[in-house]
Image: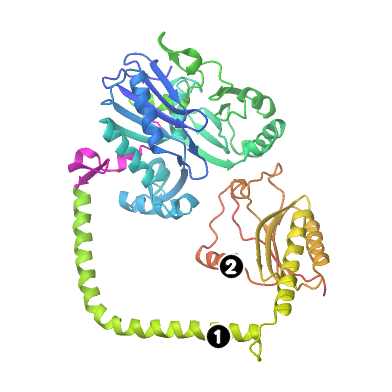
Amino acid sequence: MANFVNSTKQIVGVSVTPNVGVEVALLDKKSPTVIKYGKRHIEYNLATREIQDYDAFKAAVIDLFKELDISTKSSVYLTLPNVHLDFETLPLIIGDEAISNAILSKAEDSYIFKRIEPVSAWTDLVVNSQTDKRIIAYTSFQETAVTQLRDIFHELGSDLIGIESSYTAIIRGLYFTNVPGIEKDDNLNWNLLVVNPNSYALFSMQGTRLIDYTEVPLAIKSFSYEEAYQAISTSVSQILPNFPAKKLIIVSQSDDICAEVLKTQITFDDEVIIHDSNKYSKIPPVNLSSSVNENEAASMTYALIGALATDHLEEKILDLNLLSKLPSYGDAYFTFEYKDNTIVVTQELARQAMLVISGIFLVIVALVYGAIYLAGMGIKEQTKKIQTKINNTQNEIQAITGHDGVIDIETLITRIIDTNKMAINFYDSIATDIPQSVWLQYYYNKNGDKVALEGISANIADIYNYYKSLKVISPQSSIKLNRLQILTEVSGEEYDLAAPDLGSKFYDFEISNVKSPKSEEAVVDEKSEPNKDVKKNNPLKNTAPAARLEPIDINN
């Protein structure tokens, strides 16, 4: 058993896991035994990586605390499904603020944080004084989600002492329950495979130290039963050689994957240990008191155990508690209730409020001064716009009525029919003539004959055949194969597909006779975001520039 410390402070573990729901448990102060356990189903949005309904989460927590006879005034440690976990190499000389800025800059590369500010926690993995470098691991969550969760537990009167990613909590939970046997050899290399409903994550460990990590999006529910296992085993088998180890631990948190079955399909020469936190669960992963329902606790997650074990281990393992980087409610000047929300006023918040108020005052003065000048200019500009609209409308009326002022209904109807017929031809082709290995991502049609179509394919010949079929349907169209390029990174999460052979090439193409709005946005993105460095020995994260092929017109 891992080094266990009798804790004088009793912590309630709360964990959220897709499929499982929200779990609440209490650990005995003197032994590694769970004395209370319960769970409730709540919805988790896998696309936005956030609890779907925070009111439902709050209601579930209140219900479980009442059912288990746990005081809401307790200390609570919360684990959440991972949102973003990564590594960064930084100089030793920089301070905490510079590290936070570097993490913020890199975390914003994730699509989750394009519109929502992240909040992060980090810890040192390797510190090298000879090179003056440090390697850190960091985790990031949506700041809005963390704020809502803090408010919920504050309203309940709970002392929320930690919020952490389920991934690092799972590792601590495994250590606490002595699964990998790492207390016998701190230099033991072992791997952890965590299967989620829409991805899998692979961790390389040396004792309690994280060496490497990768997460691969995989739309498991889109596969049949046999195909799902084959897709995971094929993908994992290509990565495992880069993670040499003596043990492999498989933890399945997806109802579509049984860890015991997956074990038989993954090639690994040494010991393989399995655990299911899903409908296939059979045995609880930790000792239970007689008051706990063993069948209900069979699917207990290691993330929950990691939350319970926070203050029961002598050694800190991957301490990535988000709240350790945030001001506590104890630092507040005061709190007050407003429309069922708890407003917490801290010293930092007060300082920022003063700056905002000062800024607003200056803005008001500037607006009053500028309003007088802009009023006259605004009226003149508005008059100009109205006159332009009038002129455009008159031109359109003249084009329709002709010189004699009479609308040619027959010509107008013929023009509309011809336009719709061409558009329908393209729609028919899209619906019936798509080759098997072509996936369409975008379609744009204006006035029937202005067409832009984008997609990806694993086969160049299918792209040409699809282009030819479009030309056959509408031979009078001027569409061309304007873009054909090799993709070096295909994300299953983005395209909702998984390629069993991760080494295969995919081709991105565009068939059009007009510049689509999406193409114009892509040009802007390409200019603003240069290619990032390729991660070493990781075939799933190749972001090198794609090879470009010249536009092709099969009529020439």
Q: Nearer the viewer, residue 92 or 272?
A: 272
239 versus 247 height, above or below: below
Q: Residue at x 81, y 58 (%)?
A: 461
Q: What is the number of the mark on residue 517?
A: 2
Residue 33 falls inside the magenta stretch: no
Q: Which quadrant of the view contains residue 311?
A: top left
224 versus 484 height, above or below: above
Distance from Cα at disc 1 to Cα at disc 2: 28 Å
Please indicate whether residue 197 sits to the left or right of residue 65 in the image: right
Q: What is the number of the mark on residue 309?
A: none
**Magenta stretch, residue numbers:** 317-346
Q: What is the number of the mark on residue 394?
A: 1
Mark 2 falls on what kind of element? helix
Q: Residues within 10 Å of mark 2 (few under 14, many from 20)?
A: few
Q: Position of residue 433 (x, y in %)?
A: 79, 56
Residue type marked 2: Pro
Q: Position of residue 366 (x, y in %)?
A: 23, 74
Q: Residue at x 36, y 18 (%)?
A: 68
Q: Earlier in the sequence, mark 1 or mark 2?
A: 1
Q: Nearer the viewer, residue 394 or 280?
A: 394
Quarter occupied by the C terminus = bottom right
Q: Residue furthest left?
A: 333
Please indicate whether residue 221 sits to the left or right of residue 110 in the image: right
Q: Residue at x 48, y 35 (%)?
A: 43
Mark 1 falls on what kind of element? helix
Q: Residues within 10 Å of mark 1 (few under 14, many from 20)?
A: few
In the image, which is nearer the foreground, mark 1 or mark 2? 1
Q: How did the renderer colour the structure?
A: rainbow
Residue type marked 1: Gln
68 versus 444 height, above or below: above
346 versus 412 height, above or below: above
Q: Position of residue 184 (x, y in %)?
A: 47, 20
